[in-house]
């Protein structure tokens, strides 16, 4: 990559500004709004996961950082300070562009977008609206064989954060975020329902996490969506869009879109037009509300940034990045299915991997797929996924924990599975050991723990011990034993359970069943 100073901007902005492609899709008939088509396009602002800001040396801040501690004079817009582009941000944006099948531009440029707000120290934001880093592309949704077009991917600066203190009638400004790198990923108006929008957002989050370019966390603000919604009657051109801002979860986004669709339909059916507006979302009322109309929208007076030359990216640089791209979610899914996993199991692993567990809207991916891969290297993949999803995740969920809290190492779970597989401990004992490791955050080897707790399985040959436990079980549950004798085989399970209890899980349930039936038949 070369970042060279150009003495002048040889290409005029209007020459670079290309009209958008018009995408068409087969009409979708939705029972919720018969006769109407819903159209949605999304602008995502994803914080780039770089240690330093886009144009300055200061570190990017983490959530909970002390306010105004990661700020350089440039971030605070001190006169005389100049920007220096951070190559890491460019690299991560190029990775993202390649993952989204977008065409990385050999030459892109930075513009100033002016507006006056207390969280914007310079009075303008540096962005790439007119000559973005990448153009075109698409993202395939996980369901329905739908590809959502990508219009462009541009680099831009994040703003500072302002917090209004109602008691003191003052706004507090925290400059920590000012100047951090963002990627604005603009989609085509290709989505046709709130569900497709949710799919798009989740798939995009997974892609960004896979390439390592963003945490993609909506709740913490590292992945912010502006959702543009319009409706039209089937067969007619797209309607006027309204843009909904500040949506911080996928669930609220779906509610906001649904309520916005009904608002548009109501307006149109009563003979009014939909005015183009920017709207907010009231979570309590589950309604959108007007922030400003198109007429009030500021004239940003875009101009080329005189302090920044064009960004020139060579073909070789793009090729180097292309060669070092990690596996993308689509490919991971296909690989898991190829290993014999069910769609459901693959979904669970990948959902956990991206931190999107049930009722949980995001967190950094935590390597569930890598964990699975390490275990499945020398073991049956289906067996591994069973242990991971049913036992490990099951026990973590019961403790209200997620996979990122998992204290069981790959080596521990691997040994545990092998002990059970080789018949050295029973499945029941294996589960108890797993519980012990999780509860006590133990790093001990499962074989050592099995010895310590005398959990070694009673081998199939040790029938004497098994006979004793079975006899004790029959003695303890005489009524159940009688029922089995009278020909009710289902009650046998209770007796087997008793044997497992008496043996503290060391007996093999299948063998116990045989011995019990044998005794009761006499
Ligand atoms: N009729 C429509 N219905 C729904 N979405 C639309 C429609 N027309 C355009 N869009 C979407 O609106 C978004 C426009 O985003 P873009 O960043 O280009 O412009 P903007 O919203 O005018 O500017 P800003 O970046 O300042 O918010 C795109 O995601 C596009 O797909
Ligand atoms: Mg935009
Ligand atoms: Mg917009």
Image (cartoon, rainbow, N blue to C red):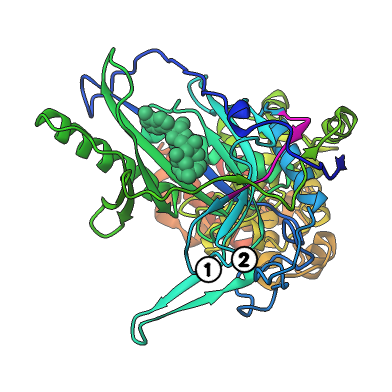
In-front residue for pair 164/390: 164
Stretch in magenta = 104-112
Q: In this rendering, would 251 be left or right of 387? A: left
Residue 348 in view: no
Q: In this rendering, would 148 be left or right of 514? A: left
Ligand 1 within 8 Å of disc 2? The answer is no
For residue 357: magenta?
A: no
Q: What residue is shown with label 1? A: 161
Dividing the picture into quadrants, the one containing residue 376 is top right
* Picture coordinates of residue 444, whole percent (x, y): 82, 67
* Picture coordinates of residue 118, whole percent (x, y): 49, 69
Residue 127 in view: yes
Dividing the picture into quadrants, the one containing residue 342 is top right
Residue at image location 84% in from the left, 60% down from the top:
447
In-front residue for pair 245/310: 310
Query: In which quadrant is the C terminus drawn?
Result: top right
> Where's ligand 3: which quadrant?
top left
* Label 2: how many Cα within 10 Å (few below 14, some 14–19, many 20+): many
Residue at image location 61% in from the left, 34% down from the top:
13
Q: Is residue 301 above or below residue 29?
A: below
Residue at image location 21% in from the left, 19% down from the top:
35
* Label 1: how many Cα within 10 Å (few below 14, some 14–19, many 20+): some
In-front residue for pair 226/493: 226
For residue 105: magenta?
A: yes
* Picture coordinates of residue 192, whole percent (x, y): 38, 26
| Contact between labelled residues 2 and 1, with CB atoms less than 8 Å apart | yes
Q: What residue is shown with label 2? A: 177
Dividing the picture into quadrants, the one containing residue 262 is top left
In-front residue for pair 241/332: 241
Q: Tag 2 or tag 1, which sits nearer the N-term?
A: 1
Q: Secondary structure at mark 2?
A: helix
Task: Give the CA distance from mark 1 to mark 2.
Answer: 7 Å
């Amino acid at each position: 990559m070369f970042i060279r100073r150009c003495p002048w901007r040889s290409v005029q902005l209007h020459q670079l500004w290309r009209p958008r492609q018009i995408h068409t899709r087969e009409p979708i008939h939705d029972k919720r709004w018969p006769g109407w088509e819903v159209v949605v396009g999304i602008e995502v602002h994803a914080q780039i996961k770089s240690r330093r800001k886009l144009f300055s040396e200061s570190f990017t801040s983490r959530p909970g950082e002390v306010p105004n501690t990661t700020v350089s004079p440039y971030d605070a817009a001190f006169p005389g300070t100049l920007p220096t582009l951070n190559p890491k941000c460019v690299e991560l944006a190029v990775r993202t562009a390649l993952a989204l099948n977008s065409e990385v531009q050999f030459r892109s440029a930075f513009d100033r977008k002016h507006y006056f707000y207390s969280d914007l120290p310079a009075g303008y934001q540096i962005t790439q609206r007119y000559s973005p880093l990448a153009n075109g592309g698409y993202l395939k949704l996980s369901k329905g064989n739908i590809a959502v077009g990508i219009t462009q991917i541009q680099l831009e600066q994040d703003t500072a954060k302002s917090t209004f203190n109602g008691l003191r009638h003052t706004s507090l400004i925290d400059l920590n975020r000012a100047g951090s790198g963002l990627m604005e990923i603009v989609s085509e108006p290709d989505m046709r329902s709130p569900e497709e929008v949710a799919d798009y957002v989740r798939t995009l989050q997974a892609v960004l996490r896979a390439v390592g370019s963003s945490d993609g966390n909506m709740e913490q603000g590292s992945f912010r969506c502006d959702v543009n919604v319009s409706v039209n009657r089937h067969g007619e051109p797209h309607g006027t869009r309204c843009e909904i801002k500040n949506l911080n979860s996928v669930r609220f986004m779906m509610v906001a879109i649904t309520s916005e669709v009904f608002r548009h339909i109501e307006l149109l059916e009563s003979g009014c037009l939909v005015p183009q507006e920017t709207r907010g979302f009231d979570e309590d009322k589950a309604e959108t509300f007007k922030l400003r109309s198109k007429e009030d929208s500021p004239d940003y007076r875009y101009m080329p940034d005189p302090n920044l030359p064009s960004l020139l990216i060579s073909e070789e640089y793009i090729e180097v990045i292309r060669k070092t791209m990690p596996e993308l979610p689509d490919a991971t899914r296909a690989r898991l299915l190829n290993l014999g996993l069910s769609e459901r199991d693959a979904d669970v692993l990948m959902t956990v991997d991206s931190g999107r567990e049930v009722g949980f809207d995001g967190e950094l991916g935590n390597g569930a797929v890598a964990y699975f891969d390490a275990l499945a290297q020398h073991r049956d993949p289906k067996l591994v996924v069973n242990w991971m999803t049913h036992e490990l995740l099951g026990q973590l969920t019961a403790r209200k924990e997620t996979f990122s809290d998992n204290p069981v190492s790959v080596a521990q779970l691997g040994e545990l599975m092998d002990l059970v597989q080789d018949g050295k401990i029973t499945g029941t004992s294996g589960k108890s050991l797993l519980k012990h490791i999780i509860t006590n955050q133990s790093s001990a080897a499962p074989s050592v723990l099995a010895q310590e707790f005398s959990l070694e399985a009673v081998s199939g040959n040790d029938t004497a011990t098994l006979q004793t436990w079975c006899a004790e079980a029959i003695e303890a549950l005489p009524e159940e034993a009688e029922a089995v004798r009278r020909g009710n085989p289902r009650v046998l399970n209770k007796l087997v359970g008793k044997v497992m209890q008496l043996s503290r899980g060391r007996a093999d349930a299948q063998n116990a069943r045989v011995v019990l039936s044998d005794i009761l038949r006499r």
